Amino acid sequence: MIRKYSYGVPYDTEAVVGAYEIGMDLPSWLTVEEEGRRFSCLLAEEEQVFGLGEQVRGMNKRGWRYVSWCSDDPYHLETARSLYGAHNFLMITSPDRTVGLFVEDPGRVTFDVGYTRRDRLTIETEGDGTALYLIEGGGPLEVAKMFRQLIGRSYIPPRWAFGYGQSRWSYFSAGEVKAVAEEYRKAGIPLDMIYLDIDYMESYKDFTVNGETFPDLGALAAELKEQGVRLVPIIDAGVKVEEGYPVYEEGVQKGYFCENEDGTPFTGAVWPGWVHFPDVLNPAARAWFGDWYRVLLDRGIEGFWNDMNEPAIFYSRARLDALEGERRDAVAAGKPAREALASLQEPVKQLSNRLEDYRSFWHNTPAGRLRHDKVHNLYGGSMTRAAGEAFVRYAPDKRLLLFSRSSYIGSHRYGGIWTGDNYSWWSHLLLNLKMMPGLNLCGFLYTGADLCGFGGDTTEDLMLRWMALGVFLPLMRNHSAMGTRRQELYRYPESRKAFGEMVKLRYRLLPYLYSEFMKAALRDELYARPLAFLFPEDPMAREVEDQLFIGESIMIAPVYTQNAGGRYVYLPERMKLVRFRTAETWEEEVLDKGHHYIPVALDEVVFFLREGHLVPLSDGGGCVEAVTADRLTLLAFGEGAAYEFYWDDGVGVDYEAPEHFKWLHAGTSGEVFHEYPGD
Amino acid sequence: MIRKYSYGVPYDTEAVVGAYEIGMDLPSWLTVEEEGRRFSCLLAEEEQVFGLGEQVRGMNKRGWRYVSWCSDDPYHLETARSLYGAHNFLMITSPDRTVGLFVEDPGRVTFDVGYTRRDRLTIETEGDGTALYLIEGGGPLEVAKMFRQLIGRSYIPPRWAFGYGQSRWSYFSAGEVKAVAEEYRKAGIPLDMIYLDIDYMESYKDFTVNGETFPDLGALAAELKEQGVRLVPIIDAGVKVEEGYPVYEEGVQKGYFCENEDGTPFTGAVWPGWVHFPDVLNPAARAWFGDWYRVLLDRGIEGFWNDMNEPAIFYSRARLDALEGERRDAVAAGKPAREALASLQEPVKQLSNRLEDYRSFWHNTPAGRLRHDKVHNLYGGSMTRAAGEAFVRYAPDKRLLLFSRSSYIGSHRYGGIWTGDNYSWWSHLLLNLKMMPGLNLCGFLYTGADLCGFGGDTTEDLMLRWMALGVFLPLMRNHSAMGTRRQELYRYPESRKAFGEMVKLRYRLLPYLYSEFMKAALRDELYARPLAFLFPEDPMAREVEDQLFIGESIMIAPVYTQNAGGRYVYLPERMKLVRFRTAETWEEEVLDKGHHYIPVALDEVVFFLREGHLVPLSDGGGCVEAVTADRLTLLAFGEGAAYEFYWDDGVGVDYEAPEHFKWLHAGTSGEVFHEYPGD
């Protein structure tokens, strides 16, 4: 059952599809105060809290105070309050009851989940109105599904987006891009995507291409596509202020940029220097900005990543002026050293992403003119919506790849997300895993972290362990920052073979991973599920936060500790351990329910197969389009194992056509080569 | 066997006690290049590398590049290269061989431990000379002991320093300090120390006291000592430049400060504003600076912590001038936004702790006038040596408490260390544990981290788990930074009882913990030992990095994960689980060798007792001086369990007197009340 409550004048974020009656009385366990700006309830000792999407800490969010406020923060430290997305859904669950809460509010929202008091949840909003949805009925899987139905079907990318992608900030030229593809081919490692970071553009101008370094992007895209590799360029939120640049000139002329109070375009500085921000909360401006993607679509580009759309602002003129003012009375004024240092440091620290700036520009929304900070959390997702809506107009029958850095619940219908700039830390490998259920709960199915770590120098063993997790995540992209150690897999002679086998395994697993993704998307279900959701009556399963069910058949338990030769794994039921030493060869071992120490070598990938279930394996391929379902190897546990297999052409949108769904059945031996279609 | 090799003109850091012959030929497994500036060797797959003292990452240091360069860095991130100390000892160990390497070099030293190539260790120095010591013979415990004998006996604090201490940046007045003591007394939580951070001083001037906020420090110290509580003030490295301040005036007059190239005192800015740094590498200046501690000793102070002695430098005049220069051509010059932002940010980032500054001042050392960067890593430890040597002159028969932030091997003879400014992160709880063996190997026995975390807001569950670790560490101090959530234990009504019981348990365990510390110090052994050192033939034991043996009888395995109800523990042999629900009551359970999942509630402390061993428990007390060994409860595993018990008056220095050593034997029941002395 879903009940809606309304306080003040809520902004319609369009997160919810369909209309709901407004309820009158909150249930007695939930207290509302401050005219709907504060909600609170007690948390029983055994109650866990899941959700909040892209956030720090564990799957169970208890014990910290989180703030929904889209922020450009690459560190994701335990004491961070906000990351790139703002995902205001959480679920309180225990064996006794499960309830979901969705706070529809486009401004800053604070979730104190047992931080100030261990036994209390407090949610505080700051805007002019909030809609609250309460969802009850069944356990965590049922409540999750009801919420997902409330917010509408998740974005579905083309199947090739489930391939392996290589990224770097930056590949600076067509030659460099071709060399990366060539090295992957020489190493025999499958590859489906090469990502272009900001340096492919001319002076960081959206929808332009640097003619010197990428003289013919269309030809490059075509040449790579021949090899099964797609080019995926970045698009940033800010539009460079430059006379003669048509995006700028048209936007100014039509009044499609975010405005200062006086109606002139707001100016901030980002990569291109001074920019205006397209007012993607204005439907007309959103359509206009989305149509610009055609410049690249027309050159054969089939996928994009949207970045810097919190929006990140390096500085504004106002902040620079404040900096100058602060400087005048710094050290010379004879302040104590710490204050002097602070008066030098703080204004510089406070140049970027400041609330003062977010309070200084306006949107023309369907609900009228609104100051940015009131609707801040909608911006990035609305930029993605701009592209997603345009893609449907441009190619209604074809899926295109799209994912974003910033997002809100609602934008999950238009694109995926990656979890932003992380670091080459073992703790971020684990965080990658831990974020998955929260993201899925909030509608983001096509998602993943920068494998092997974006910032900082990676290590070879971290890369091996992270890739072994990446094998199972929808978005499998290796990305790294300028100035850091290179992360292309072919650069590590000692581990090249192991990396290659892991990526090949991904392509062998594709029939399973893709099927599971599609079923989750089409049925509003979860692709990655915590043990707690499947075994809510098992106290040990409820506690496990470093294992995940991926789809219906398998559980993963990646190693995330340096110099560890394995790890502990809790099996909530009897399962079959499957250990891949290469993509071709594996070992199986049935293990009883309970605690196990599982050795895992650096070059191995393991998972655990549920009884009565099976995993269809393809013969692999050098790219996703080379992977067929003509012949499947069924890796099964139990004679009666059966599997509902989804397979379509991977690019069309007739998702529900019945011929895409087939049942596979394990042979009497448990594992058989299976001529498909076979049932 | 210890062999010494010499390259160039090594500086005598006095890390080593005694003289060693210079060997001629390095063993063939070790390669030396670049005239002794690079050493390298292969690392076999099964070889582990321990040591490097205060550093990031695991007990086994393989897989990262570390730099010995004393640095003021509170984040201790996985990609950090340097922390506050510089500890150039490491040990390569496998079941086949164990070898220790000590690089005596006071400048920057880089240890690439399987980072660039997974199978190679490379050590690079940058100075004018290096002495290399190779230690072989026996396993890790034997090599560790030989190294510790090489560097001389570790600092031994008074026994009261094993009590619980409460710190805060800052307690601002005598009244505030008294209130803290009073609140602890009212809560019934034992307390031995209250720490004074920088605000007790007048304008941050060393060896002064703010007369308004602390009108009579001597009376305050005496009043608190009546209650069993010692005041422990901080001393910073920098001496404020201020006419009329005698430390400043005398230092200038005697030429005892670090000098610019022209012989005038070098000036940097730290908390007090402009300061000079005492030239603690000059023996005469060191003695002079050390004698200043008498100002506080004479007021009844018996312990100090030395801080900011890397030395941290907020900025220098030269850096400020550089900042001004950089600013002139920042944004207005029309640079691209990122460069403009960088040209605003970088000079500010580069104000503090800069190599350029460390290259701009000189020391008058016994080996002549040397530029600071050549001997940088000796500075902080030499400040501690200044105090330690002065304390022996001042009170030759009495121990005083002393610990430092910065340190080098050699300074372990003069004081302990804490591991500097950490954060209220679960990862720093684990890092606290992981650092212990490396610190012990490098001679630092009296050591610990800021419990519950210095920076960032703590959480109640993190505090409970961190305190449960702190119970077993020599330096048990709860410290937190200005602006963060308060961490005094009495402030948490829900957990006050649990905190109290944990601290009381510490006092009950004192006979054991103190005995083990004293035996380790007097015999040049380790207080905290990895499982790998005790069970080198057990591959699983070799891999465990989140458990520790504390002394001869017990193993600890703290919980370090939020919302976890327990953890996995590997027992390398049959052991007895001892679970304390309060300081008075416990449960015991014998567990077989192997893997176990051990539930541990937030208010519990558990440890694992070795067979044939016992732990003597006192009846507890409100402060260490109230703890007696008149009656001991022997917590034993096995009928024949025996224990060598060390107990002295806790303040004198006749450490080896035979009457301090006694054997305790378990009664036939395994646990008996034991009238002491009983054998």
Image: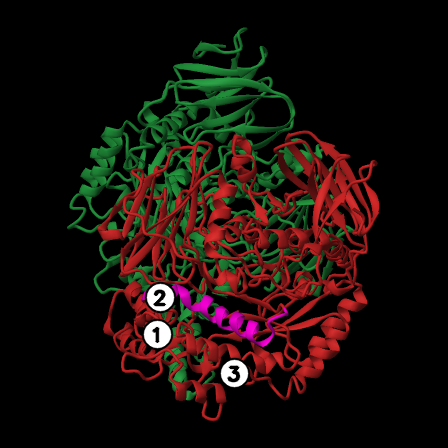
Chain colours: A red, B green
Look at mark 3 in the image and give the residue it sits on: A205
Res A278 seen here: no
Q: Please, which chain is the residue tagged with disc 2 on?
A: A
Bounds of the magenta span? A374-398
User: Residue B267: x and y, percent?
Assistant: 35, 68
Q: Residue type at mark 3?
A: Lys
Look at mark 1 in the image and give the residue it sits on: A363
Considering only vertical position in the picture, is B338 above or below A34?
below
Q: Secondary structure at mark 2?
A: helix
Q: Quadrant of residue B74?
A: bottom left
Q: Residue at x 52, y 83 (%)?
A: A205
Mark 2 and mark 1: Cα distance apart in space: 9 Å
Main SS of residues in magenta: helix
Tell us which disc is closer to us: 3 or 1.
Answer: 1
Q: Secondary structure at mark 3?
A: loop
Q: Is residue A384 magenta?
A: yes
Look at mark 2 in the image and give the residue it sits on: A375
